[in-house]
């Protein structure tokens, strides 16, 4: 087990960008270093608050989508476009995260991401039209995209002996923030006088808390990197050689993971954006529809611990892929046959199906032997995957508007589960990208 003082110094140094090594001096040697316990607790709080902020901008909108459409005079196709903005931003801005992290340090980039989320959520209620609303949403989603990519990197790099525990904490917090926004947005809106703008803007408060925690974290990293003799050595992992780029584009496993990630993201964003509307059209109240979405999202809290641990104990993750897809198919069939009568059952089944997300992240970590390979594979799979997921919500909105019901959209959602199973089984095979290189 490593020495706590050394672990603290290493953690503090590597969160900042590497700085040139200076000759050691008695003053530098005696410079106070931050407490390991203080630093660890603050970083854990930062991870939790960052994760809590990664979905409310999306699920709060899903709960009030009908009010937003009426208030901004959106068509069904435009609303579908709105639900496709998250994966587009994740694909575009998420690909910038590794480069920004190398130049500025992951702590500063996460701080910038939290600030962007807060600013976007504060500006969105003041949007007078669809274009301004989309721009403010894109700003928040840019911050989410940067943090999306760097949160797993921070967990793996700064808690190397507690990856499973911290990943579970991070995933649980993400699911909690997702479900909390889905369940509480409508009641909060009603308590604030029924104005959907206030109901959406209130979630900026979580962002303010995250900025308040990450600001001292980012500043602490800079001082530690300058004052701590171990800092140059600690920054090594951030500058480790990267895996060759050609391995990603030529790897069947990388493409299978990217397609699996994209198809599960398609289902997740269709669910977050449209499931409350499906229930409301079936006669369920707006408040209950939001709670049903929250039930779907909260399934990720316990399963975020179970599925990754189970997956790492299996040589082939294909059976888990199939089981999750079958839950999704059953849920969509239920929404088609009895959307209101079995609403709670369908919400639970779709929540289980959506846990393909932590499974995808786990498989990304298992499909490379090196840390640099995992970073590159993660960037490839998430960027390509989010691009794949963009058309789904738009197509669902268009089909809903032109067909006047949910039969065709639900058929599409169920049909997408079949290729998700196929590519998921391929991605789950016991091999690495280095084997294919």
Image (spheres, rainbow, N blue to C red):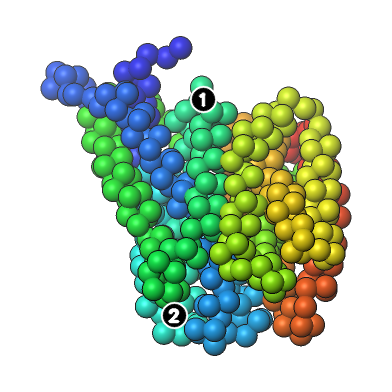
Is residue 407 shown above or below 165? below
Q: Viewer-proximal residue, 109 or 294? A: 294
Query: Residue 325, which numbered label?
Result: none
Q: How many marks?
A: 2
Is residue 350 in view from this perspective?
A: no
Is residue 122 in view from this perspective?
A: yes
Q: Residues within 10 Å of mark 2 (few under 14, many from 20)?
A: some
Query: Residue 162, which numbered label?
Result: 1
Residue displayed at 29% across by 33% down: 225
**Left or right for 369, reference 119:** right
User: Which residue position holds label 2?
Assistant: 132
Residue 256 horizontal/vertical position (percent)? 78, 48
Residue displayed at 26% across by 42% down: 216
Q: Residues within 10 Å of mark 1 (few under 14, many from 20)?
A: few
Is residue 122 shown above or below 176? below
Residue lying at the far left in this picture: please name it: 27
Q: Viewer-proximal residue, 17 or 200? A: 200
């Amino acid at each position: 087990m490593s020495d706590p003082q050394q672990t603290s110094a290493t953690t503090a140094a590597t969160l900042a960008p590497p700085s040139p090594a200076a000759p050691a001096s008695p003053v530098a040697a005696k410079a106070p270093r931050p407490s390991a316990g203080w630093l660890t607790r603050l970083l854990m709080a930062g991870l939790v608050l960052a994760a809590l902020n990664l979905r409310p901008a999306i699920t709060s909108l899903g709960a009030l989508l009908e009010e937003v459409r009426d208030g901004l005079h959106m068509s069904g196709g435009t609303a579908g476009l709105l639900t496709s903005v998250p994966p587009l931003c994740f694909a575009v801005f998420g690909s910038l995260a590794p480069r920004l992290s190398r130049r500025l340090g992951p702590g500063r980039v996460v701080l910038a991401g939290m600030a962007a989320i807060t600013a976007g959520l504060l500006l969105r209620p003041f949007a007078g039209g669809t274009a301004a609303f989309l721009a403010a949403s894109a700003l928040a989603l840019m911050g989410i995209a940067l943090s999306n990519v760097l949160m797993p990197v921070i967990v793996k790099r700064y808690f190397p002996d507690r990856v499973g525990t911290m990943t579970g904490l991070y995933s649980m917090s993400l699911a909690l923030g997702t479900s909390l926004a889905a369940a509480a947005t409508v009641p909060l809106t009603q308590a604030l006088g029924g104005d959907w703008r206030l109901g959406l803007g209130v979630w900026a408060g979580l962002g303010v808390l995250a900025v308040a925690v990450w600001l001292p974290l980012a500043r602490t990293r800079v001082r530690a990197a300058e004052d701590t003799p171990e800092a140059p050595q600690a920054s090594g992992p951030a500058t480790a050689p990267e895996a060759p780029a050609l391995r990603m584009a030529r790897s069947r496993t990388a493409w299978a993971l990217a397609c699996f990630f994209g198809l599960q993201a398609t289902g997740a964003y269709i669910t977050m954006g449209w499931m409350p509307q499906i229930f409301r059209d079936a006669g369920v109240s707006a408040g209950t529809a939001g709670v049903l979405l929250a039930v779907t999202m909260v399934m990720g809290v316990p399963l975020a611990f179970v599925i990754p641990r189970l997956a790492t104990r299996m040589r082939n993750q294909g059976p888990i892929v199939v089981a999750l897809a079958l839950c999704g198919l059953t849920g969509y069939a239920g929404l088609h046959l009895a959307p209101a009568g079995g609403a709670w059952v369908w919400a639970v089944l779709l929540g289980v199906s959506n846990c393909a997300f932590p499974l995808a992240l786990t498989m990304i970590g298992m499909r490379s032997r090196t840390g640099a390979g995992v970073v590159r594979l993660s960037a490839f799979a998430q960027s390509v995957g989010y691009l794949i997921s963009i058309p789904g919500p738009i197509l669902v909105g268009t089909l809903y508007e032109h067909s006047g019901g949910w039969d065709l959209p639900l058929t599409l959602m169920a049909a997408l589960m079949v290729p998700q199973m196929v590519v998921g089984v391929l991605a789950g095979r016991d091999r690495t990208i280095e084997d294919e290189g």
